[in-house]
Amino acid sequence: MTSTSTKPHDLQSLDTMTGGAFTAPTSGERAQRIRDWLAGNPAPEQMQEVFKELSGRDKGAARLLREKLDELKRARGQEAIAAEWAQKAEALLAQPKLNIADALAWQRDAAKAGAPLSREPLASFKARLAERVKGIEDLQHRAQVHREAAVLLAQRFEVLSTKGWRDAQAAEEALRADVTHWQQQAAEIAADGNWTSLDAKFAPQLESSKAQLLVVSDAFHQALGQTVAAAEDAAAPLPPVPVWADELRVARGGAPEAAPPAAQKPPAPKVDPEKRAAAQAAVEAALAKLEQETAEGHGKASAGAAAALRAVLKEHGKMVDAPLEARVHAALVAAGELEGWQRWSADKVREDLVAKAESLLKRPEGQALGGRKMQETLRSLREQWKQADQGGVPNHALWKRFDEACNEAHKVVEAWLDKVRADAAEHRAQRLALIEEVKAWAEAQAGNTDLKAYNRALHQFADRWRDAGHVGEKVFAELQPQWNAAFGTARAPFELEQKASIERRQAMIAEATELGAAPMLRIDAVKALQQRWQAEAQTVPLDRRQEQKLWDTFRAPIDEAFNRKTADREKAAAAMSEHDRYVLDASKALEAANATGDAQKIRAAVARLEGALRGEAPPPAPPAPKTAAADGPSVGATEVVAPGQAAAEFGESAEQAPASGDAEASPPSAAAEAAAPTPDLVAPADGADASARTDAAEAEAPPAPAAPPKPAPKPVIAVRGDDRPGNKKAEAAPMGRGNSRFGGDRRDSRSGPPGRAGDRGGPGAGRFGDRPPREERGPRLGDTAFRAQRDALERAEQALRKLAAQAHGEALTQVLGAWEQRDASKLPSVQELGRAVTPAVRGQWSQALTSGPSAKADDAAEALLRLEMAAEVPTPAEQLDARRALQLKLLTRRGDPAPAQTWGQDAGTVLAAAHDSALARRLQNALKALLRK
């Protein structure tokens, strides 16, 4: 039997219970539905079940459940702690005698244990204990004040006993009432409920003060009654108070009792001189110490020295002579003044400390001190107060103000400490939950093969542990071993895979070392080994530094092998042949010619470079250009061509130029012009250049003092296209060397001009193309020379093309200027206009400009529309209807020539009309495209 899983049903019920959290389309909606469900306070068991299913689907939504569960767990833990400390507080409050230290220790220990003192019921217990402690402290203060009041009442009795008995009789009733009131207050203090919680010393002190006060009061009243009786009856005995007895004795007519005569001093006994000298030495030593400390201003040390001097005087004062005694008294007076100054300066320091303590809570808004800063400040102030107490007599009044200010400011520290303790308890709970989560995750990841995800999860756990908040050192020392054990268990499978991966990589490093040490580097084996390394690196991640170190070790032997191969290749390339040097020199010369912007020099440099490519000797420098004779070109002469004409001539290739009957009227081709100044590079038409080269080589041998003159080359006939026998002029000329248009076939080209012996398809071609190498191609070039000549030829082509474009624009501007001025002499020549304009067309344009404005406006407008149709340029918006009408009209005339065939005549029709700026702009746009075709 196969058991069906109930998980879909569980998911459906959980989805219904959570309001569709599992079927929500987005993570945000899932999180919102989880929040709405948690607002209803579901059971913890339900939240745990939903969290278990949702944690693997949506981490963000599951985080809300985890936080809620952690909060409930913390709340349950804090409830248990609160109940425990509530019982302890009740036990303290139930004691008849409460010790203040126990009450303060309860609050401190409860905060350390993480009890929620800010929530009920601990908040009420905390307040009750604080109130009870405050009542005990107040009762202690009242007892001390009452004891001082008893002393003051006794002093009043003593003062009255020194005055007349009638004054004492007048104040008797008030004193009796004050004593009675004092006794009532003492009884209230003893009857207070906190009296039993006071220190044991307060009850005896209050009782002794009461007994002493009653004894003094009773004696005073008895003496005063006896005085009154003696005043009324002269036979009555006098009171024991001397002042009152003298007053009564005087009243009875007697004399006051005289004071006993002072006793006469007995004669000083004789002292042994040795004892007197020893006493003098002891007093002088103590005196010298006191004078030294006083001179140096040491208040505390001078007080000690003064006390030592007084002790010596008590022992040896009778044996000190008068001068030394005077010095002793002067030193003691100076020490007393220094002590007074020290007391005054200490009070100034204390006043400053009091001001600082009172200003801690009176800082401007936004500048209040935090808990830790406040704690450090209070510690510093109290340390400074202790130092001030060491240098002078304590000042209790300033100390009371200072202590009250510090206690008031310490409330901020207490609030901060409460928050720190609560946060520490929360962080401890979070860390414990994280440890349990790591343990559960490690058990669930058994058999996981996705090591990247495994490593990512481990890093996430480590980051969460590091960011779990601050806990105390004791708690951290307790939790860190648990975390290390759980995290080590979770990381153990991954570390085993890493160890195996490192062993495999070490094996691949050994293979790379063998491949790099081989005499012939196998590229396929290197690529396969690198692919294996990449696959291993993507499967098992390592520490970044370790992985980089292994990769550098793996790459080093292969890089070294490639470097050796590159060095060998560069060494071979460095051995440049003489032919390569010739080609490099010619390429540099062509680059220099390109920089001049002269088309004639560029063509000459191209011709020299092509000659160097064919393996010919380097030609001599070209002679200075001369003006051609009127009867035609001669050998070695160069035809003077205008820059615009030369550029226009380069814009059209020899094969594409229209064949006109007048060969002398057409300009020479690019190859012909390039060869004109260098007759040595022109190959003879009869094919005898081999013998000529042999003769030249024999003539240039080292024994000969000078090279014989070269045979005069045949004059170059300026014709368009290739004039070799069998060549078809209609066919396009082959592309030049390096995909250039300047001639010179590539060595690896299999095709050539038709009609040559040895070419494929031509006479002498073998079945498999085993023709002899063409001598005119020259030796194979090295990489440096080949790239140099290719780049030079490409730049030359670009420069000539740019010059041709400039010449084209100048010719078009001259045509429009001649039309505006109606001057046919300013019309450019046929060579300047280019191959698109025949002499007949130019003659028609010249005649139209000479005859004056004779064409009708409609004919000129139609001719301009035909020009725009032939050039395929846009027509202004206002002429679109006319252009469409003309197109329909041309469709009905199938026998008429198309506008592309009659654009020369149409341009002449426009030029025959009157000049107009709008027509001139349209004509310029049309001719710009037509003259390039």
Image (spheres, grey):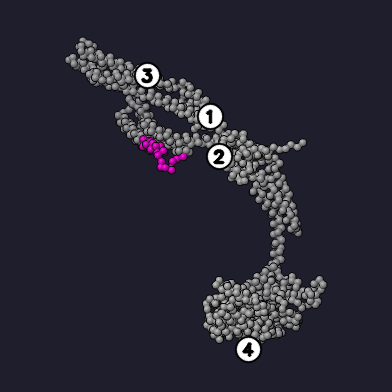
Q: Tell whether position 726 is magenta.
A: no
Q: Identify the residue position indicated by label 3 in the image.
A: 187
Spot occupied by residue 162 in the image (x, y as percentages of width and height): 25, 20
Q: Identify the residue position indicated by label 1 in the image.
A: 82
Q: Tell whether position 360 is magenta.
A: yes
Separation of residues labelled 1 and 2 (CA atoms): 23 Å
Q: Identify the residue position indicated by label 2 in the image.
A: 469
Separation of residues labelled 3 and 4 (CA atoms): 153 Å
Q: What main secondary structure does the magenta stretch of the protein show?
A: helix
Spot occupied by residue 284 in the image (x, y as percentages of width and height): 36, 31
Q: Is residue 598 left or right of residue 118?
A: right
Q: Nearer the viewer, mark 1 or mark 2?
A: 1
Residue sitting nearer the eye, 42 or 443: 42
Mark 3: amino acid: Ala
Spot occupied by residue 528 in the image (x, y as percentages of width and height): 74, 54
- Which type of secondary structure does the marked residue at label 1 adopt? helix
Separation of residues labelled 1 and 3 (CA atoms): 40 Å
Q: Identify the residue position indicated by label 4 in the image.
A: 630
Residue 588 seen? no
Give whichever of discs 2 and 4 has the lower sequence position: 2
Chain part drawn in magenta? 346-370
Q: Is residue 301 left or right of residue 72?
A: left
Circles 1 and 3: CB atoms closer than 8 Å = no
Q: Nearer the viewer, mark 1 or mark 3?
A: 1
Mark 1: amino acid: Ala
- Residue closest to the far front: 892
Q: Residues within 10 Å of mark 2 (few under 14, many from 20)?
A: some
